[in-house]
Structures are given as C-alpha cells and as structure tokens.
Image (spheres, rainbow, N blue to C red):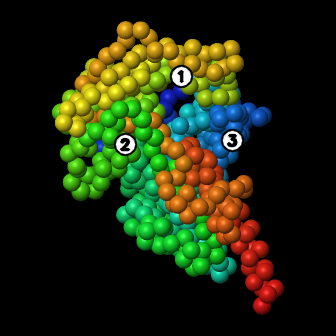
Amino acid sequence: MKHNFLNIARTTLPERHVEERVRDYDEYASRMDDQSVQQQAARCMDCGTPFCHVGDLIGQETIGCPIHNYIPEWNKLVTKADWMGAYHRLMETNNFPEFTGRVCPAPCEGSCTLGISEDPVAIKSIERTIIDRAFEEGWVKPRPVHRKTGMTVAVIGSGPAGLAAADQLNQLGHSVTIIEKADEAGGLLMYGIPNMKLDKDVVRRRVRLLEQEGIVIRTNVEVGTDVTVESLRSDYDAVIFATGAQKQRTLGIDDDDAVGVEMAMDYLTASMHERKGASLASVYDAKDKNVIVIGGGDTGADCVATAIRQGAKSVVQFGKHPSKGLLRAPEKPWPLQPDTLTTDYAYAESLAVYEKDPRTYLIRSNQIVTKEGRVTGIETERMTKVVNPDGQATFFVEEDSMETYPADLVLVAIGFERPEHELRKIGVEKTKDFHTAVDNVFVAGDAKRGQSLIVWAIREGREVAEVVDAYLDTCKTVLKTSS
C-alpha cells in the first residue's frame, strides 16, 4: 500500500493502566504486537537521505542516531515480517537495542523526515519490538570467541560505554576484564534508571551474555581504593576509563546540605537497592512526605515516579525554564529535536494519583527552610525568561513573587559534571581521539564528553574500541619486532 504514512496514524508502545502500574515497579510499557509494529514500520518513507541515522551534532543538539542504526532498512524488513533479518540488521550497529529501545530519548524520531509535516515514525517502539521478539524466539545467543590475540584490556565502569567497548574488543579477540565498583554491572542502567523504565533482569540478561562470551566482570572493586591505576597499567596492555560523569550538581544555596535535601541519583540508587532486599534509609523514603524535585529532565521525572510509588503525600517538580509548547518551536527547526511538551509516564501517573501535573515552571529556589537541621520547605521566586536577539537567554525575578513550598524531602536532579574522582585524582588529562596523556590509558563515554545520551555512550564505547584495537595491534607488532 502506497503512502502508508498518510493512511496509518502513529502509535507507540502499549502502556499498562496508570492505576495498576503505580502499585508496583514493573515496566510500564511492553512491546507491540506483530501486526501493529508492521503497520508502524510501513509508515517509514525510506528517504533518499535518511536523517534519522545521520548521528551528528548541530551545536550541542543531536540530530539522528549517533550509532547510525540502519533504520529504514530494518523498517522494511519488519514490514515483510522478516524478523530475523531485522534483528541482524539492528545488531550491526547497536550492541544493546534492548536498552535503547526502552530508555533512549530517540533523537532519530526528531530527525525523521516525516516529522516535518506529520507525526514521525515510531522508531524507538519498532526497535524495542524487534529485539524483544529476538529474545523471545531464542535468536540472541552467546558468541564465544575462540581465537585470542593475547592482548589484555581493563575497562573501568560498566555503563553503556564500558559494556559496548568491552563487547567490541572481546569480539576482536582481546581478553577483556570489566572492573565495576558497584555490586552489579550495568552502571546507571542498573542503579540510575528505575525498574519501571528498564527492568533490571533485562540488564542482567545482557551482562550474562557478555560473560558467556568470555568477558570477565569484577564487581565491588573501586579503582583508586581497591586497586591502583599503576597496577592496572602494569597488568593490562590497555586500560579504558568509562566511569561516567558521576559528580552531581548541587543547588549552591543556603542550607542545601540539610537533612532531607538529597541527590537524585542517591535517591534512585537507594530505591533500587530496596528492590533487591536492602533496607531503605528513612531519608530516602517518600512515604507521607511532601516531595519537591528540582530539575526538569528525565532524572527528575524518574524521581517523581519513584516518589509516587513510595506513597508521597504530594510531589512538585521545579523547572527554571518555561513550559514547552505543543508545536515545534521556531528555534528548534527540523532536524533538531522538536522539544515539545509531552506527558511523560511519571506525569501521567501524577495526574492520576494527585489529579495535577507536578511540573512548576520558571521558578528559582532561593533558600532551603529548615528546623533543627532538617528541611521543612523551600523559599522560591518566580522568573521571566527573555531571549536576546543573539539567542542568549536572561532570567528576571518577578517582583513580589516570593513563596514558600512545604517540603519534607527535596531531590536535586540538575545534572552531572565531569567524573567524580578517578580521572582527576590520578591526574589523567583527556586529549583527543580517546587517548589520555598517559600511555595505554584511554577514556570514553560521559567521562570524556560529559553528561550525554545513552546512544552517544554506546557510540563512544564502539569508537574507543577501534582506537584501542589499533593501539594493541601496534604494540603487538613492536613486541614481535623486539623479540
């Protein structure tokens, strides 16, 4: 059927009823049925120049898929019900589509050509359905490597960048060891993203596959404490730091260290440990509390959803920017992300539980209000945002807009800075092309580029693997020559 994009409306992954899902931590969305996903794939225009997989930057904005997924190709295979073919095509560029199909913000959809005039193709939903079906059919199997190069690599950190680098290098025949300071591999995939978005058994399933393929994973080992960088450099031919941008930004206002003012990632990590059977510290328990989340991004939304499930009395989310519009803003032309107002899973849940959207816009937190060292509220002011002719934004405080919000728990979700301590503590300075100033030490992912998207982390992991492979090949040639 021609012109499917005109005849078929966009649909995305089916979601569980809000009233049901807020009572547990199971995934809120599931894969599409075969007929629905084939119809969605048929909406693809198979463009002559598919911007959906360009994978580049315009300024700081991502356009298309950074890992260059062959999106039109596996869309066509899906329409033909060639599920195995679609799976193999998907795996050519993406090590972990079961992760990206769940938690990637999908810049590919923002750059979909159809999105100029219609709703874009539901690329992320199609991707997840392909890989979920592949696991269901048993097509995803370990790929053990039988020919080894004799070269060894240590990968520090097991988030998407570290796992991707390890996967690529292992398949090239190098002996890879992942070193992770937490008790399970996965990094933020395991502890930073709530289970309702990414079930942890999905992460564990992939980690088991990597181990079955020969990768060694050492958990509960912190570089700089349990093992030194010098010993790693001596024991391995190459060392890759993929530790992420772990240092969380603080509020920088009076009494922001009061009891009950907590970092969002610490809160989400504690919640995940509780899911595994650990006791939840009272400071991280939102039950019957007035909760304020500061920060309007995905991590903030995850805090909202988690607090709802813990039984919070109320949840409010502060954002410093104005509400987004329903239509693509003039400053966000295609193929940039449209950056329109959407009702994220957490906000749909807030509407159902509290009968209101938790988001409050253009608000500045001036001071934490405390009693006996514990937070009781936040003093705020309203702001007006003015964009100058040169595109720079300026915020002005509105007169007589001071207000105090009651708060028993404040969660700070305003982003991350550079690595927390490892790279800076050992004095490793980043240089270009993934190399550092220290021979045989490399860096990739958020540790190199700062806080970014999961697809950029996977791309960085794949690219650093190429650089390290070339380095190891040179080392091996030198060793053979010297012998």
Disc on the earlier residue, 3 or 2:
3
User: Around disc 3, counting alpha carbons within 10 Å, would you say few (fewer than 14), some (14 to 19), or many (20 or more)?
Assistant: many
122 or 364: nearer the eye? Answer: 364
Specify whether 269 is left or right of 457.
Answer: left
User: Around disc 2, counting alpha carbons within 10 Å, would you say few (fewer than 14), some (14 to 19), or many (20 or more)?
Assistant: many
Residue 299 to residue 84: above or below = above
The residue beneath circle 2 is: 263
Count of numbered tags: 3
Residue 193 to residue 303: above or below = below
**Looking at the image, which residue sits at the far top?**
400
Disc on the earlier residue, 3 or 1:
3
Q: Nearer the viewer, mark 2 or mark 1?
A: 2
Q: Is residue 479 visible?
A: yes
Q: Is residue 163 visible?
A: no
Locate residue 233, reporting x and y percent. 60, 74
Locate residue 7, reporting x and y percent. 60, 22
Q: Which mark is residue 331?
A: none
Kind of element beneath mark 2: strand
The residue beneath circle 3 is: 55
The residue beneath circle 1 is: 340
Q: Look at label 1 and name its amino acid.
A: Thr
Q: Which of the 4 image quadrants contains residue 254?
A: top left
Q: Look at label 3 and name its amino acid.
A: Gly
